[in-house]
Image (tube, rainbow, N blue to C red):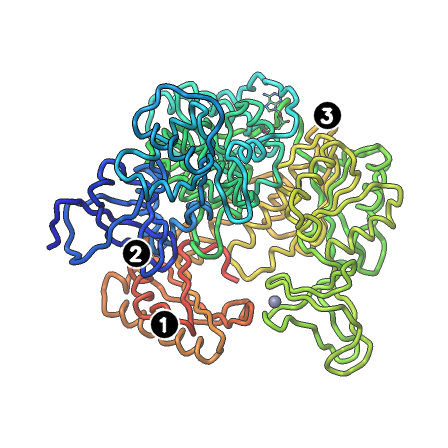
Amino acid sequence: MNKEAGNFARIVIPTPLKEPLIYKVPDPLWEQIEIGMRVLIPLGKRKVTGVVLELLRETVVPETRAILAPLDDRPILDAALLQLSQWVAQYYLVTLGEVFGTLLPPSLRSETQRTLLLKPGTFSACDALEKRILDRLRQSKGKISVKRLTGEMSGGNLYGAIERLESIGAVEIRERLPGHRTRREKIFLEAGSAPTLEAQPRFILNSEQEQAFRKIDQRLKEGGFETFLLHGVTGSGKTEVYLRAMEQTRRAGRSSLILIPEISLTPQLIDRVNARFPGRVGILHSALSAAERWAQWWHIVRGKVDVVVGARSAVFAPLANLGLIIVDEEHDPSYKQEEGLRYNGRDVAVVRGKLSACPVILGSATPAIESYQNSLDGRYRLLEMTQRVQRRPLPFIETIDLRSRFNRSQQPNGGKVPLQTDSPPVQQSGEHRLISDRLAVFLRKNYQASRQSLIFLNRRGFSNFLQCALCGYVLRCSYCSVTLTLHRKQKNVCCHHCNFRRAATTLCPECGNLTLSGVGVGTEQIEEALHRLVPEARIARMDRDTTSKRGAHGELIRSWEKGEIDILVGTQMITKGHDVTGVTLVGALLADLSLNLPDFRSGERTFQLLSQVAGRSGRGDEPGTVIIQTYAPDHYAIQHLIDHDYKGFFAAEIDFRRALNYPPFSRLVCLRLEGPKFEEVEKKARMLGTTLRDKTTKNARLRETIEILGPAPAPIEKLRNRYRWQLLLKGKQSSSLLALAKQAREVLPRSRSVRLHIDVDPYNML
Ligand code: ADP
Ligand code: ZN
């Protein structure tokens, strides 16, 4: 037993492979080191950054190395966040190092170089240490690195002293991050400055909003954890309810966190939050530069914001005194991280609410099946908003059946069509058409009426793939088992999984003829077709190809908002929560694309996507129309969509889930093996399957509660030159599933040739 006078600290190093290590806290640092603080520690021959997880009186570790220095003047993570990290590590079966690697902005994971600069003027009210720092600065021409100072001035609270000197304007702290050299205030102003804030209206809540708000408000006043599921149709004014709840939270002196699926797609929401909490909003998302993220993080740690808006990883924002968490569009798949730490931001948000004893609001027009079931089970409290604000009608939705040679349109409500005067005839063309005649007529009319139209196709590129007209050969990615998509503007074919590209050609590599041609359509082709169809219209496209440049999203959305675009065509990006009042027509092409994925959530996903995109229509004074072109007009997802009937859809979907014992009736863990050699991956996958089956048959409890499916090749068998096999564990309780998955890790320890990824509550199983 190592029992010296000094204490010890359990320290997390934010890299995936590391479990916490124990270090000694040397005497001079005793007073300064706190739980949740960053420290500089020796590791092998290097010096690395760690975070103090726990302080210990004693340790059984015989030899410990000493902490070199604290890296900041205060903890960057509080007790609740540390607790949350531990929950995440246990539930998602990862190391704490992996969790911290995700949670901390990259620049906080390593040591930043800080320099002190002396500012002109004389300053009184300095204590001895502060005087020493100023003297030292004068000696070295007004400039010294903090690291150097740390070495020279041990003892005393150096960082506290520096901070005081900074606050009285005696010194300036300059931080250097990889590739950046900026003052911290400046970084923050740049990152936080919103475009001009127009005066935002303060609505009188309508009665449904009022009722929802009152229940949340009551919980805020009483205190404690509760999860609300705010189920409000598109345009019902959910955002206004969030804003009121956030204001109440601030009145009580506490902070709020609001998560949104993709921040670049929703500049409007950020504007609205900025307008309500001017100068008190922190923003966290992955598109920020390292310097911006770092500055935002510090601003939040220092308590300078009341509200944080962010994407998935902002669920770990270091807000002190958290009083409310909101997850907007809680059903959105982008809350699920698909690599590294495979967590679901929405689920972690609920756990954080529980640990912080504060309410959580999950909002959606199309709640995830699991969430809605939770509300029926009484785990979440259901709040419903069934009407659009100001009694605006929901859009009128009709389908066009792509199966028949003669497209038929299906019109509910006895064929009542809003643009009644001269409803266009149904298309009478035998050939397969991208845009049906009926949709074409609606598009032209809408353009002539100076209104905006949205065309949704969930596939980018020009053609889906290239095929040889003579020998039938299909061009595939060399690294993934998927076809290459033709991008005509860029004159190349591209893999949408690994981004492999090569020049487009008509030469068939199989038979040598110049007979390769495009099959299937993508957004690029639709854009072209639209130009032919409505030549005068201003047409723009929004997908990953047109928005890869930083800021491109925002610009597109803003000109869409301002009415500078007549027709916007795009992938699922255009379905997200924009509130643009000029949009009165939405067309969804090949609407059942997502129905055909080999995934038990394909019906849910289709219903959600189409409801969201339909919900963009008719948000202003004019009623909206939606035209859905589909090969599956009778599928229940499409049928309930036409009627705006979430509950009907839920009832049908839940029957299907129950029949096949899928979530929410079971929990899943996906074990995926990946490696460069097919035979090896297969062998290990089979071995793992046999071992796990053995373990379950020997254990009565596991045998009855866990089902093992597979191993089998993943639907996408090869990705980025790695072969993929998977096993699916299905069970009633997550505890026994996790126990079994943990054993899989022991059977297949980390190896170079075949890697095991454990995905708890998987979303994407392709
Ligand atoms: P949702 O998020 O439910 O789709 P939003 O919150 O975007 O809906 O609200 C739709 C529109 O209605 C927004 O333009 C919003 O400013 C406006 N709005 C919200 N509440 C009210 C209200 N009580 N009265 C009038 N307009 C409102
Ligand atoms: Zn590829």
Residue under numbered circle 2? 19
Q: Please state which of the two labelled residues, at mark 3 or mark 1, is closer to the viewer.
A: 1
Residue 621 tag number: 3
Indicate if the residue with disc 1 has its beta carbon within 8 Å of ligand 2: no
Element class at badge 2: loop
Q: Nearer the viewer, residue 369 or 70?
A: 70
Picture quarter with ligand 1: top right
Q: Amino acid at mark 2?
A: Glu
Task: Tell me if 95 is positioned left or right of 315 in this view.
Answer: left
Q: CA distance from mark 3 to mark 1?
A: 59 Å
Q: Position of residue 476 (x, y in %)?
A: 66, 72
Q: Nearer the viewer, residue 123 or 216?
A: 123
Q: CA distance from mark 2 to mark 3?
A: 58 Å
Q: Residue at x 36, y 29 (%)?
A: 321
Q: Amino acid at mark 3?
A: Asp
* Mark 2: few/some/many CA within 10 Å (<14, 14-19, 20+): some
